[in-house]
Amino acid sequence: SAQIADLQQKLLDADNGDRAKQRWDSIATILEAKCALKYLLGELVSSKVQESKLQSSLEQSQASCSDVQKMLMEERNHAAELETAFQNQILVQEQQHQEKV
């Protein structure tokens, strides 16, 4: 029973795929061609709008990434400056300690 149900489902899936292809292959009148063309143009416009939104999102993400990279570089530079200052303080403390000893 399970195998029969599986085969029936496969036939239905194949039939649905064939129907879509047959619809395009069976366009016989200008009215059907106009409807098909109208549908395709609608899909094209929808795709272009989606592409535009994705492109805008990508540009915003790139700008945000650039800002974060700049902030990271600034923080690294600041950390390096602090480390240098702390190293200098350590040297001064060591020298003072040596003088005391």
Image (tube, rainbow, N blue to C red):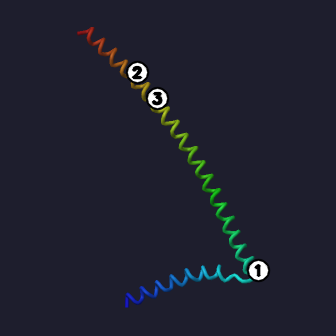
Which residue was labeled with disc 1?
A: 30
Q: Residue 63 appears at what percent x and percent y? A: 58, 43
Q: Is residue 4 above or below residue 50?
A: below
Residue at screen point 69% across, 64% down: 45
Mark 3: which amino acid? Asn
Which quadrant: the C terminus?
top left
Q: CA distance from mark 1 to mark 2?
A: 81 Å
Task: Decide if residue 75 is on the left or right side of residue 35.
Answer: left
Query: Nearer the observer, disc 3 or disc 2?
Result: 3
Image position of 93 (left or right of 58): left
Q: Which residue is mark 2?
A: 85
Mark before the other along the chain sequence, 1 or 2: 1
Residue 1 percent location from the top left of the image: 37, 91
* Numbered disc 3: secondary structure: helix
Q: Which mark is residue 77?
A: 3
Residue 94 has which mark?
A: none
Query: Residue 58 in the image: x percent, y percent?
Result: 58, 51
Task: Residue type at mark 1: give it.
Answer: Ile
Towards the viewer: 32 or 85: 32
